[in-house]
Image (cartoon, rainbow, N blue to C red):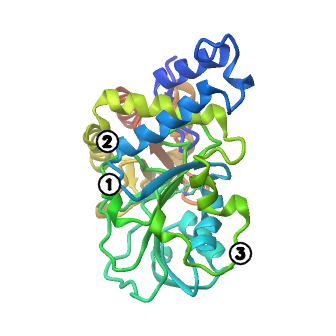
Amino acid sequence: MKKHNFYAGPSILDQSVIKETACAVLNFAGTGLSLLEVSHRSKEFDAVMTEANQLFKELLEIPEGYEVVFVGGGASMQFCMVPFNLLNKKAAYLDTGTWSSKAIKEAKLFGEVDVVASSKDKNYTYIPKNYTVPEDVDYFHYTSNNTIYGTEIRKDPDVKARLVCDMSSDIFSRPIDVSKYDIIYGGAQKNLAPAGVTFAIVRKDALGHVEREIPTMLKYTTHIDKGSMFNTPPVLPVYSALQTLKWYKEMGGVKAMQKLNEEKAAILYDAIDNSKLFVGTAEEDARSLMNVCFVMKDEYKELEAQFADFAIKERGMMGIKGHRSVGGFRASLYNAMPKSSVEALVACMKEFEQKH
Ligand code: PMP
């Protein structure tokens, strides 16, 4: 049975990325050694890091004055690195889900946090509107895609304050205007690489304005100055990230990804909206293209476990169970997800519906 990978993260990577990584594990860049056993200071790996950095900048059209760093610690480490490096007195945060709340919790260790709006009152099923970001804050932080709740902010916001965004689960899914941001960060394990590497796009002149001492490893300048090689970087995930970036370029870049993502999400949302059994959980204008969350309508709730069983065990729809805080189902349609898998999921939903 063909398996379709709907996991939310770590999640699907293009087959070419997996194959190239597997080959390098056996013989890296013709060295006769495995990628797992070569020095990160070797000229072969140095070339990987350099190319990954260049391609990252090229694909997102990152302007002058910014640097991209690859570090460890996950996006969760960025929740504290951002305030450590930027927060003097007060920061503004938008609370749109579990990951935003976790970022807020860390920021509170460093200063005052103004939560400008929250969608917690309706279990994060919408994106708050009509809030204002005070101009006197050190920065405004938001999460562009709420992986757990399936909501997304796809327009780069216009704010006067410095802008920081957690793009863990929708980076490279569409073009972004990087010049509006001071820091964009994310874990790689959705649209970039296997787990283990974290990226941060940093406007250099946003740094150096806090008075506190920052531990060396938590200082962005440490990693910028050393080209992400201050200490041993996560070699294998960086290698895989490069393969994904090459694949994006071959596919036509982030604009092509956006078109594909819009098409894929439309197929699934359309099926949900026209279904007798299923209903989407996110408000329509907040729907994510990356994580499609849906449940059984109240009158069919008792069929939920049965559908999960059928879809996973009989039709190979892996990872479609919703996060425990939402329940139901979540189909993650990251960049590497082929349209054919989305069509297979829709066929599986229709088949189940016909039987019930
Ligand atoms: N932010 C978002 C939007 C996420 O989806 C996740 C992980 N699923 C995180 C942060 C935390 O990332 P990590 O596990 O890399 O710390």
Compared across the picture, whether 69 is left or right of 219 comes to left
Mark 1 lies on residue: 176
Relative to residue 310, is residue 294 depicted above or below? below
Residue 213, which numbered label?
Answer: 3
Disc 1 on helix, strand or loop?
A: loop
Q: Is residue 338 above or below residue 308?
A: above
- Mark with earlier residue (3, 2): 3
Give the mark nearest the N terminus, 2 or 1. 1
Instruction: Give the camera-side residue of 120 and 334.
Output: 334
Question: Residue 24 is drawn in which quadrant?
Answer: top right
* The label number, if any, that marks residue 254 in the structure image: 2
Q: Amino acid at mark 1?
A: Ile
Q: Tell me how far mark 3 sits from mark 1, CA to CA.
A: 32 Å
- Do labels 2 and 1 touch, CB within 8 Å? yes
Where residue 219 appears, as percent x and y from the top left, is 64, 63
| Quadrant field for ligand 1 | bottom right
